[in-house]
Amino acid sequence: MIRNRPYRLARAVLILMVLVAVISLVVAEGFSGGHGSPAAGSSTGPSTQPSTTTTAPPPTYVVPGSAKGISLYQVDSYSTTYSEPGTSLCVPSGSGQSCGPRVIRIGAFYPALTSGSSPVPYRGYYRMPLVLFAPGYAMDYQNYMPLIDAMTSAGYVVVGVNFPRTSPPAAGGLYEADILHQPGDISAAISWALAANNTSSSPLYELIDPSEIAITGHSDGGDTVLATAYNTCCRDSRPKAVVVFSGAELPTYPGNYFPAGVSVPMLVVQGSADTVNPPAASQQIYAQAPSPKYLLWLQGADHWVAYTQTSSYEAVVATVTVDFLNGYLKGDAQALSSMAPAGNITGLSTLQSG
């Protein structure tokens, strides 16, 4: 038994040292003004947990879905009308005409989460780019839901714009020549979206990154966004990217296309069997546009199938379009690298870049 005394003594000394250290720590905490745990039954005081510094995540956009049909979040939307300030619209009425404000109809689409039975806007660490969509003549933006869904589920706020005279039901009847006023409608819709982004009662409140805007459009809507981005008659400098689906340089716009010093990244999409918009019109846009530019050629596609219907063409268009937008609005270099394999599908499509 005597041989165990050194061990017992050492253990006792160790225990004594630990107790002294604990008592010293408690006393020091009390004298330094620190807060101990509240006694049972007392009011809760400040936390005894040490303060920590939280590091913000890296500056990348939250992408709540993909363009390939795998949506992690649902798409929510609402519609409204907007009277453009400082404009007027006169339409035939009886033997004369009736004049009033120029009104555009707007559909806003945004990624949403489900909260109970109601969807709520998805808000990540960073705001999302804004994409405007312009429909073709006699068309409604809702005819293009496959494309709009793809862009929205990929992490974009998408605003569809129905025009006063070329989208049904048009005031005074459909009137295609009113396309000359439509670049102003696109600019007004951008301003509306940015105002909604700053309005606390709006579902779009603080969803949009106002520095990252793209404009897209099909057919006459493609003509419209091309003029908005690249014609001196009506250029809006806010868009940072433009997508033209089966569009053309409309000669009736009074300005000049592609002025010196203007370079907005552009994706042009064209079906080879399009009998409404000549394929040569898209080839002309691509040839004259400055870099960076891309031409997605759809082999055998007509004027509608790639944009208004769920199809193999639409899948290619949606994927390449989202890659393009990710590259130029979100700064995703990998997305730009993905455009070529996504757009070059044997027997279906080819992608050219400049």
Image (cartoon, grey):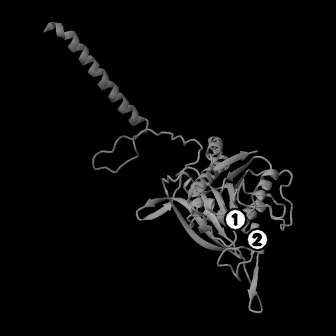
Left or right side of 106 for 115: left
Quarter placement of the C terminus? top right
Q: Which residue is mark 2?
A: 179
Seen at 64% across and 52% down, the residue is: 321
Q: Position of residue 45 (x, y in %)?
A: 38, 47
Which of 218/242 is in front? 218
Q: State the residue position of label 1.
A: 191
In the image, taking residue 24 as reference, residue 291 lies left or right, namely right
Circle 2 or circle 1, nearest the eye: 2
Q: Quadrant of residue 207?
A: bottom right
What amino acid does circle 1 point to?
Answer: Ser
Can residue 198 be seen from the camera position used here?
A: no
Residue at screen point 66% across, 46% down: 327
Give the residue furthest to the bottom.
Answer: 95
Categorize mark 2 by other alpha carbons within 10 Å: few (<14), some (14-19), many (20+): many
Q: How far apart in space, not on screen, are marks 2 and 1 (Cα)? A: 19 Å
